Amino acid sequence: MIKILVNDGIHPLGKQMMEAAGFQVDTDKVDQEDLPKVLPNYDAIVVRSATKVRQALIDQCPNLKVIARGGVGLDNIDVDYARGKNIQVMNTPLASSQAVAELAFGHMFTVARSIHDANRQMPTSGDTEFKALKKAYSKGIQLRGKTLGIFGFGNIGQETARIGVALGMKVLPVDPVINEMEIGVNVFNSDEVKLSVKLNTVSLEEMLANADFISLHVPFIGKPFFSDAEFAQMKDGVVLVNCARGGTVDEDALLKALESGKVAAAGLDVFENEPTPRRELLEHPRVSLTPHIGASTMQAQANIGQELADQLIAFFG
């Protein structure tokens, strides 16, 4: 019997599919330090972002045939080493793209109208305080007509572009590999009414100089993509959204840019020190915060579970 350890959770649909295929699926969480004792008994491990599958652990698991990641990024897995040991590495690049893109725009809308801060400041009684807040939050901005920079034009970046185009934003994507992409935008949720827009990628310098909003959709490569030098090239009053990975933005540089006004506001779903983000960000009045929930919608989790199950069943079938 094929034995699969699902260490960071999976939607019940995915578990049911694998059990129906005759697999033993164990979903009790194993602490990272205990994995070398437990994982050698399994044919496959399914993880998300919490569990790390590094070279030392791989070497201790001679029976391991598959490492499956529920999500897009693979930075918590030593992919090349695993594949060099003939271990299949899988992920689900399409299942959660829409969920992450929608959260990115949730942050954009939130900071554009100061919803996050207004929600905290709403008075429980008294019309004087209410009127003062109404005046304080009367200088919001609209997204239509603004320029959206997208850093990373893979599946999530493309989904972000679709929403931006539908909102009437000018989209400037940046990607080291993709030069152009045709974006299909459904109108009124109809397959029959569709816009097709060809987007050409631009240089990082052009995007930074022109974007009113910047959304990151890249993996973590061991160092930040955006530090002091990149912030210096941005327009004054830019909005930065990171629903990608903690560490892709230098948080010291971001805080300096927020204090100087270079960055008007930020939306963050990921942090350098998860699960304990720094207090300066948590308490900043111009930062909208979520606890790494980009792919955490019911629809996305069902899609991820089904896609993982399909891949594992096909591999072991």
Image: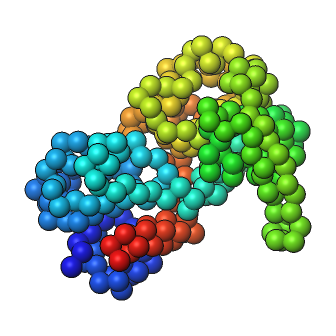
Q: What quarter of the picture does the N terminus occupy?
A: bottom left
Q: Nearer the viewer, residue 87 or 122?
A: 87
The answer to which quarter of the image holds residue 225 is top right
Q: Residue at x 36, y 64 (%)?
A: 9
The location of residue 266, given as percent across then percent down, is 63, 33
Question: How was this image coloured?
Answer: rainbow
Q: Nearer the viewer, residue 205 or 228?
A: 205
- Residue at left 21%, top 49%? 58
Give how far across and how far down residue 114 sits, in percent.
71, 40
Residue 100 lies, with reference to residue 129, above or below; the image says: below
The vertical placement of 205 against 82, above or below, is above
Q: Nearer the viewer, residue 82 or 25?
A: 82
Say whether residue 108 is left or right of residue 187.
left
Quadrant (top left/top right/bottom left/bottom right) for the C terminus: bottom left
| Residue found at x 30% / y 65% | 6
For residue 267, say whether it is visible.
no
Residue at the spot 46% in from the left edge and 35% down from the top edge: 220
Residue 144: image x %, image y %? 87, 43
> From what the image shows, is residue 128 above or below residue 238?
below
Left or right: 105 in relation to 194: left
With 284 as the anchor, is 101 left or right in this view? right
Q: Is residue 66 visible?
A: yes
